[in-house]
Each structure stands twice: as structure tokens, then as C-alpha cells.
Amino acid sequence: MESIQRRKTGVAWLSVISNGTLVILKIVVGLLIGSVSVISEAIHSGVDLVAALIALFAVKTSGKPADEEHPFGHGKIENISGTVEALLIFVAAIWIIYEAIGRLVHPVLDMEPGWGVAVMLFSAVANMIVSTMLFRVGKETDSVALQADGWHLRTDVYTSAGVMIGLGLLWIAERLLPGQNWHWMDPVAAIGVAMLIMRAAYKLTVESGRDLLDVSLPEDEEQWIREHVANLDGAIRGFHHLRTRKAGAQRFVQFHLLVSADMSVDQSHRMHDDIVGAIKDRFPACTVTIHIEPCDATCAPECIEGCLLSEDQRLEMRKQ
């Protein structure tokens, strides 16, 4: 567990350092050449830096064990982190559009785009490397915060490439057709950046916010649990009231298990431990709660869907 936490914290720190460096480079180059699209990318990276700091805090906090005040752990801090990051992206996108419209109305005509192309290329390559690492560690450790941070940087890869293409076209156009006003390309590229940012923000809001509302686990995960219980030996007669949710990387699973009425406490306890162990092997960060009930084949409505007995078996049990 400690090695997993170290990996999460290490890659989160890498994101902070990378974003901090890119913010400085983009601001310096953007101010030197007067490019609103490069400055907008600096703002984007600034938001990414804030997001990376939030993700670092979330990763370190979510790794704390459960305590008296937080009996279900601290996992939801990662979901809160992702939601805050998404809101920050929306704010940055609106600011970029505002500045770009201003440049369309009052264009800057003495811009030299060459340095802008260079810093955007560097930014795209750096963010591709760091985001790939964030995705890999985030998926391996099921960290919502790291995956959200990865999406921040992967979006920055695409927007940096867009700005680079816009500045490159401006540079080429000025040399092939000098004397024409091509500087509208720069704020148009910035608006394109903002649109992509807002799209990513919407996806992040949905992904990070769903677990704050205790939405059930994905259908394929719940289906695995159902199939595992259904495929156990004949001592289990059914199950119902399956409820699942997720907080950060931590999953919570609970259901009622119907067993033979004459099963001993010792047998039911060992069966309980075997099922819990199998679910935790499949989903390592998982808390499983099973309520064991005796089955007398009365078949209450909630039992029918998860019943593992045939109609003949139920009839035979009712006769006894």
C-alpha cells in the first residue's frame, strides 16, 4: 500500500513541476511576441498547475486510513478534486474567449510567431510524456485525481498543437503574402483552444461528480459480482439487495445472501469470508458487507430475481 501511495505522490509532484515550468515559459514568450493564443495557453497551464496542486493534495489526503470522523475513509477527496479542477477549466476558458475577442477587435500587428511555435512544440511533447505517466499510474491505482490531472495535460497537448498550427500558418502567410492582415489567426486559434478546454471540463465534471452522488459501480463490475455469487456451490440459494458505490479508488459493496436454514454459524462465516476474499481479489480497494439470511423458499418479491433454486427445488422445500 505504501509503494502505491509513493507512486501516486511521485507522479503528482512531476505534474506540478512540469506545469510550473511551462507556465513560466509560455508567459515569457507570449509577452515577448504579443500572442494572445500563447498567453491563453499560459493561463491554461496555470490552471493545470492549480489542478496539479489540488491533485497532489487529494492523492496525499485520500491515502489516509479511515478514522472516527471518516469511518468510510477519505477517498471522496479525489472526486471533489476532479470537480474543482473542472470548474477551474471553465473559468479559464471564459477568460481566454474574452481576451481573444478583444484581440480580434484590436489586433496586434507586430507579432513574431516563431518563438511561439517553438514553445508550443515543447509544451505538447512535455505534456504528452507527463500525461501518459499520469494515466498509467492513475489507472493502475484507480486514482480519480491523477486521471483527471492526466486529462488536463492531454487537453493541453491538443490545444498547444492547435496554437502551434495557428502561429505556424500565420508565420507562413506573412512570408508568402506580406502586407496582408493575417493576425486574426492568433485569436481565432485561442477561441478554438477555449472550446476544447470547455469540452474537456464538461467530461471531467460528469466523471468526477458521479461518485459524489453515490452512483452504482459500472454495470460490468456489478455483473462480475452477480456471476461470481451465482456460480458458487449449492449451499447458496440466492442473493438480493445488491448495492454498490465508489469513493475515489475505494469501492463499497453490500448485499443479502440466502443460505440453507440449517447451515451452522461456522459454515456461514467461512462462506462469508471466502466471498469477501474473492471480491477483494478482483477489486483490491473494496469494502464488502454481506448480510446472511436463512432461506425457507417463501420467495419474497425481492428474492425472486437473485434466486438460484429451480422451481422444483422451491416446491420441494415448501413441502418440508
Image: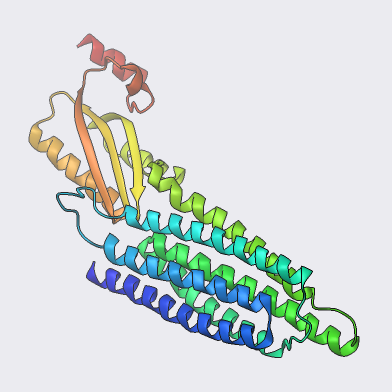
Q: Position of residue 74 (x, y in %)?
A: 27, 55
* Quarter of the figure with residue 123: bottom right
Q: In this rendering, is residue 224 above or below 125?
A: above
Kindly give the residue lying farthest to the top in the view shown: 319
State the residue in front, 282 or 24: 24
Instruction: Give left or right: position of 160 versus 68.
Output: right
Q: Is residue 177 visible?
A: yes
State the residue in front, 63 or 305: 63
| Quadrant that contains the N terminus | bottom left
The type of colouring in the image is rainbow
Q: How many marks?
A: 0
Kindly give the residue lying farthest to the front in the view shown: 106
Instruction: Give left or right: position of 171 versus 80.
Output: right
Q: Position of residue 19 (x, y in %)?
A: 48, 78
Residue depicted at 46% across the width and 68% down the height: 135
Q: In this rendering, is residue 62 above or below 50?
A: above
Residue depicted at 9% across the width and 33% down the height: 265
Q: Position of residue 199 (x, y in %)?
A: 61, 57
Residue depicted at 22% across the width and 37% down the height: 290
Q: Is residue 221 visible?
A: no
Residue depicted at 74% across the width and 77% down the height: 166
Q: Position of residue 285 (x, y in %)?
A: 28, 55
State the residue in front, 45 or 104: 104
Q: In this rendering, is residue 178 above or below 248?
A: below
* Quarter of the figure with residue 66: bottom left
* Quarter of the figure with residue 182: bottom right
State the residue in front, 314 or 119: 119
| Quadrant that contains the C terminus | top left
